[in-house]
Image (spheres, grey):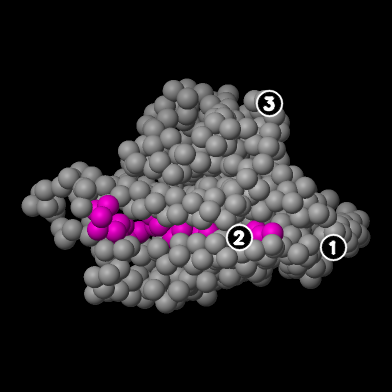
Amino acid sequence: MSFVVQGKTNWKFLLIIFILAAIMGGTVLVYQYWWLSQEKVKIGREQFLPKYNLLIIVSDSLRADALSCYGGEANTPNICGLAKQGVLFENAYSNGQSTLPSSLSIFTGNYPNMYIDPGMALDFFKLYENKIITFDNIDEFNKVSSLFRKINDKELLLATVLERNGYDTKYKLDFSSLDPFGSRHFLNCCNQLQGLEKLKEYKDLIEKEINFIEDNTDIKNIGLGYEETYSVLDYLLNIKEKKFFTMMWISDPHEPYSPPEKFKKNINIEFSKLSRKSEFYELRYSQLGLNLPNFTGYDIYYLKQLYLKEVESVDERVGYILKALEHNGLKNNTFIVFTADHGEGFGEHGIFYHQDGLYNEIIHVPLIITGPNIIKGRRIKEIVSHIDLMPTLKDLMGVDCLYNPSGKSYKSLLVSGKDSVEQRFQIIEGYLSSAFIENNYKLIINKDNTFELYNLFEDPGELNNVSKENQAIVSKMKQKMSQLRIEKLIKMIKNLPNIQDKGKYISGLLRWIKE
Ligand SMILES: [Zn+2]
């Protein structure tokens, strides 16, 4: 993870200072933590008048620039129609590059690596520092698969508080047997975030899913994932008096790219020009460390077309949900959020899928919010990231919750004519790499400690690394970033649920410094 690899010497020095400060301030921290958590629980139990519903729709692996309202090729009238009824963020980023870290930031308002299990962190870092996961060493990686700790009840996520105030917070994440891939979704309830998916299991599931699609004509025609939509539709059409907070996790356009036949048939392709079998499922395996297949440009073109058609099928599903809300008279009283957990690469920077790389195809996500009092048809240029979402939603819902979030509310952008909120650095955390975005600039710090700087305004495709000619900007960003990492680390330890975990984490850091 990012905070252990870069600039080891400086980093260690800063950590020593931090640890000394932490030891001295330990008693105060413990007391403060105890006091704050008691206070927050009390606030969470206070009654407030439930006024609004909240629906969050997350599409898995949907890069922003696929959608027509972000200049993309997919025809997405429902999602983009939603943008006309509310606010669209042109520059929204996920804080992680894959599902689990990203979801953590969506639900908590904090950076993903603030939830690393203190007992697992050191082993994980050691393992990841020098290795790439392959099927040969997959078992070794499984040993450290529970990278993230569970969210403690006292950390008060929005759902917890709403539930205590009579909301129905059943998440529509109980994937049916029709979705053999469903178990990759660990979020059975948002205050019970589970550990990292097990890679071995993941591999088995891929095979199962491929066979399932290939053997099942109905699924080929209808499309995998529609079952999730039907269960949410059923829920929304039948919910009566009770206010709700529900989340619809659409597991597409995540690979394998298997759009329903009615979308797929519109792809204009000459199959004889493809270098391999049509569906490219084998590409999936390359991601986990096997040799990257030698795709031709035409292969990649087809892969991308399949993806875009799957995006159109996601749009169809969003359309059904919006109609159900309208039909049941819920639309005017419901905040609707549409976003994606991360994007998807198609070789723009030599990267496919989304387990690696922090270029915009992987981390630039759509973000659209509509609801009571929200300005209609506004496009915001301000740079925001997923950690800001929960602080914003709690403000919109009028609830006090979240323990010590790092994100900031941008409610004022949604309900008033304000153009910007407090300017902030946005941090995106990959596996041992990280990216920092401020104004026009994006600094990527790679795991080998090399830097890339892009001027996103002049070079949105991130093709021209300008770090050499902009040394002053790089060093200013690096300096700011070190400071933010220390602040983040302090907050991370402060947020750990108990004194034993705080101790475990600090002793882990000390061990790491010694080595
Ligand atoms: Zn995902």
* N-terminal-most mark, 2 or 3: 2
Per the model, the C-alpha gap separating discs 2 and 3 is 29 Å
Query: Does the magenta run of residues contain 140?
Result: no
Q: Nearer the viewer, mark 2 or mark 3?
A: 2
Residue lying at 53% horizontally and 53% vertically, measured from the top left: 327
Per the model, the C-alpha gap separating discs 3 and 1 is 33 Å
Residue lying at 69% horizontally and 62% vertically, measured from the top left: 241
Quarter location, residue 172: bottom right
Direction from residue 84 to residue 178 in the image, left or right: left
Mark 1 and ligand 1: say if the CB distance to the nearest ligand atom is below 8 Å: no
* Residue linked to disc 3: 418
Label disc, if present, on residue 45 of the rendered structure: 1
Q: Would you place residue 84 above or below residue 346 in this image?
A: above
* Residue linked to disc 2: 246
Query: Does the magenta run of residues contain 250?
Result: yes
Residue 242 screen position, x and y as percent:
69, 63
Residue interval drawn in magenta: 243-264
Direction from residue 205 to residue 444 in the image, left or right: right
Which element carries disc 1, helix, strand or loop? helix
Residue 354 screen position, x and y as percent:
42, 53
